[in-house]
Image: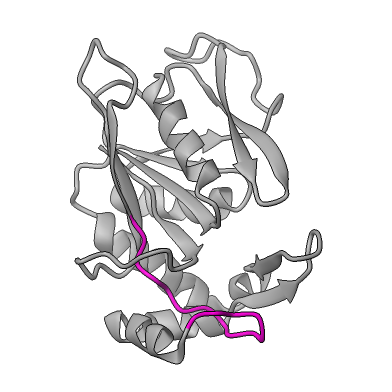
Amino acid sequence: MIHAPSLLRRPFFSSSSPPPPPAASCILPPPPLLRPHVISSLARTPISLRCSAADSRSPSNREMAAQQDPRLAGIASAIRVIPDFPKAGIMFQDITTLLLDVKAFRDTIDLFVDRYKDKGISVVAGIEARGFIFGPPIALAIGAKFVPLRKPKKLPGLILNHFTGEVISEEYSLEYGTDKIEMHVGAVEAGERALIVDDLIATGGTLNAAIRLLGMC
């Protein structure tokens, strides 16, 4: 089972369950089938962010998200929205201001730890780059290893433990182009429970690429 939470997300539709951080999951088949067989859900529960003039979310949605966990309001207020970055029409969710707020940063990590501890998760996979900020402390807190999902040509081709040095990749679409993520072969084994961490879900392309990538192991 792969769970893929995101710190920020746009409210595509509501989940019937009200866990604090949203998550997406897919089913990994047992060996010898290594690829995900089916994406079982993309349960996107709206999380409140700082409201801007271009924010289409209604106050009722933001208030409902805050009621799910009081920490969400503080996290939302610590995030800065920058319009037209990196190109026109993009509302960039800047988490650097959240990282400067010790309480909001701690609450963010604790939200995910509270949900995913004691779930038998052995892998936390962080998507470059900001998944590298949130993923490691979550991994340490729940007793899991951390696996970086990197941009192309960033992973060394070295043999380390059971790693073969081989790198596998998946392409995905962004709101403003395409990109790839890569992972070492052998970093995740079939049958492991993995948690995918990133800071934002926009189109869902990166998340789906990460799910496919983990399913190749």
Residue nearer the viewer, 125 or 6: 6
Q: Residue at 48%, 16% (x, y): give it.
A: 185
What residue sits 74% from the left and 66% below the top? 89
Q: Position of residue 54 (x, y in %)?
A: 65, 80
Picture quadrant of residue 158: top right
Q: Which residues are magenta?
A: 43-57
Does the rendering let one see residue 103?
Answer: no
Up-down: is 45 above or below 81? Answer: above
Q: Is residue 93 left or right of residue 69?
A: right
- Please give left or right for residue 193 compared with residue 55 in the image: left
- Compared to residue 193, the image places residue 10 above or below, namely below
Does the rendering let one see residue 42? yes
> Closest to the observer: 148 or 202?
202
Q: Quadrant of residue 12?
A: bottom left
Residue shown at the point (32%, 60%) measured from the top left: 113
Image x and y of residue 176, in percent: 72, 50
Image location (x, y in percent) of residue 208: 46, 39
Depth check: give the residue in front, 171 or 124: 171
Quadrant assignment for the N terminus: top left
- Quarter of the figure with the C terminus: top left
